[in-house]
Each structure stands twice: as C-alpha cells, then as structure tokens.
Amino acid sequence: MVPLPYYLTLAAVLFVIGVIGVLIRRNALVIFMSIELMLNAANLTFVAFAQEWRALDGQIFVFFIMTVAAAEVAVGLAVIISLFRLRKTVHVDDIHLLRG
C-alpha cells in the first residue's frame, strides 16, 4: 500500500510540470499536452483521496473530468489543425487570428 503523501507529491510534481509547460513553451501542441498533464494531476489527486477515504466520489469526479478532457481534445485539436492549415504554424506568438 502506497501512502497518500506519495500520490499527492507525484500529482503536485505533474501539475508543476504542466504549469511550466504552459508558461514557457510557445508551441500550441505542447501547451495543449501540458494542460492535459495538469488535468491528469488533478485526477490522480481525486483518486488518491477517494482511495484514502474509501469513497467513490473522487472516482466519479475523475470520470466527469475525463469526459470533459475528451471533448476538449476533440475541439482543441480541431482548432489547432485549422490554425495550422490557415497560418502554416502552431507557434502561439505567430498566430494573430484571434485578436480583435
């Protein structure tokens, strides 16, 4: 049995890696993967607390988060592909299409 602080430490490390990826990288695909990494860190936290407290609430939240993440992947990748086809780049500094 792995103690709860190990899971929480791993989730915190994954979340920090995701935040650093969003803040530092300029490639839209890498930013997108970093956001997914942060969602998975939150999922790990929910599952760890659900296991610790012997409750299913955390696992139900994870199910809904995974559903939203799947929809986000579908829409996000479609937007990234259409931007690449239009601008021939996925670097967020080079994309001025969404500015007013």
Image (tube, rainbow, N blue to C red):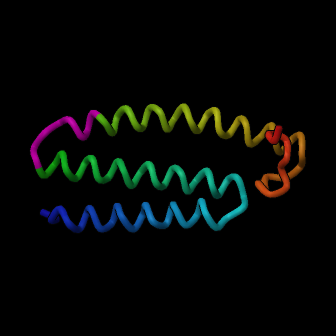
Q: Is residue 82 left or right of residue 30?
A: right
Can you name the residue that lies furthest to the right here? 87
Q: Is residue 90 left or right of residue 20?
A: right
Can you name the residue that lies furthest to the front here? 100
Residue 11: % across, % down = 34, 61
Q: Is residue 65 left or right of residue 96?
A: left
Q: Is residue 33 above or below residue 98?
A: below
Q: Which quadrant of the structure image shows residue 13?
A: bottom left
Residue 44: % across, % down = 32, 52
For the magenta stretch, what is the residue range? 53-60
Q: Is residue 59 magenta?
A: yes
Q: Is residue 39 magenta?
A: no
Q: Quadrant of the N terminus?
A: bottom left
Secondary structure mostly seen in magenta is helix
Q: Is residue 33 left or right of residue 29?
A: left
Q: Is residue 60 above or below residue 34?
A: above
Q: Is residue 12 above or below residue 47?
A: below
Residue at horizontal 77%, vertical 40%? 81
Q: Nearer the viewer, residue 23 or 27?
A: 23
Residue at horizontal 44%, vertical 32%? 67
Q: Quadrant of the C terminus?
A: top right
Residue at horizontal 29%, vertical 53%? 45
Residue 93: % across, % down = 80, 57
Residue at horizontal 20%, vertical 66%? 5
Callout count = 0
Q: Which quadrant of the structure image shows residue 86?
A: top right
